[in-house]
Image (cartoon, grey):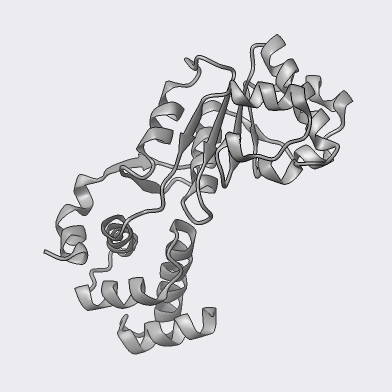
Amino acid sequence: MNSVNQARQFTLDFEHRPSFSGDDFLVAPANRTVIDWIDRWPDWPNPALAISGPRGSGKTHLTHVFISHSNATSVDLKNLKTTEIRPIVLDHPALVLDDIEEIAGTEAEETLFHLLNVVREESCFVLLTANAPPARWTVELPDLRSRLNAIPHAAIELPDDTLMAALVVKLFRDRQLRIDTSIVDYILARAERSFDGIRATITQIDATALRERRNITIPLIRRVLDDMN
């Protein structure tokens, strides 16, 4: 049985979880470890957690799930002043810091070190995201390196073909649309292979079909993908 047929048969077997947008998403082996950590909050063994995953693996979506779950706020570390850290920590139960590896060699290393200290002092929490695990972040501040080495880490894997196919089927079903397996195959072979890429593609296909009052066909999808690319 190919991945598309598996997706059609088992789409509803993937666990559906509410997201920040009110939609739901599919929990699968690729993201299960991170979801388990999010579910455990605030019972974390450390006030900080690092999650990593390649671009397109769903980090942004899962950080928004965490924000919804914990009432956290997202912080731009590069534009954060040291004097602003404690008030922000006191006002929120958790913080989210994205793309941490980008601060390497910048003044934001000192800011992050101070933030981690304040988070611990005030019994707050922080979720850090990056493309690579913390051990591969090339930070230069020794004290920060030591602190990061002690942070628990969870990885998100790229979604496999079955999960990607299941996502395509689910997103069409969310719109009360049933599609042929050939359409799923066509989209997966040509669309951006990421959670956000697939969602953007399905949204544009549906919008085009509604605007033109046409059925969803491969010629229509081909034109949409050409326009998007």
Answer left or right for 5 relative to 111. left
Give x and y (percent) for residue 97: 66, 36
Left or right: where does residue 201 sit relative to residue 174? right
Does the image show residue 17? Answer: yes
Residue beneath the point at 35% across and 37% down: 32
Query: Which image quarter: residue 165?
Result: bottom left
Looking at the image, the residue that sits furthest to the left is 1
Q: Position of residue 111 (x, y in %)?
A: 81, 29
Q: Can you say whether 74 is above or below 94 in the image?
A: below
Q: Quadrant of the C terminus?
A: bottom right
Q: Is residue 180 visible?
A: no
Indicate the position of residue 174 as horizontal and vertical percent values.
32, 58
Vertical relation: 40 (above or below) 193 = above
Residue 1, how many percent across, how many down?
11, 64
Q: As rendered, which of 102 and 139 lies closer to the eye?
A: 139
Quick one: 181 or 157, which is closer to the camera?
Answer: 157
| Number of marks in picture | 0
Residue drawn 35% across and 89% down? 219
Q: Looking at the image, is 24 positioned above or below residue 1?
A: above
Give the left or right position of residue 46, taking residue 168 as reference: right
Q: Residue at x 28, y 71 (%)?
A: 184
Looking at the picture, does residue 67 appear above or below residue 120?
A: below
Seen from the viewer's position, the closer of residues 102 and 203 is 102
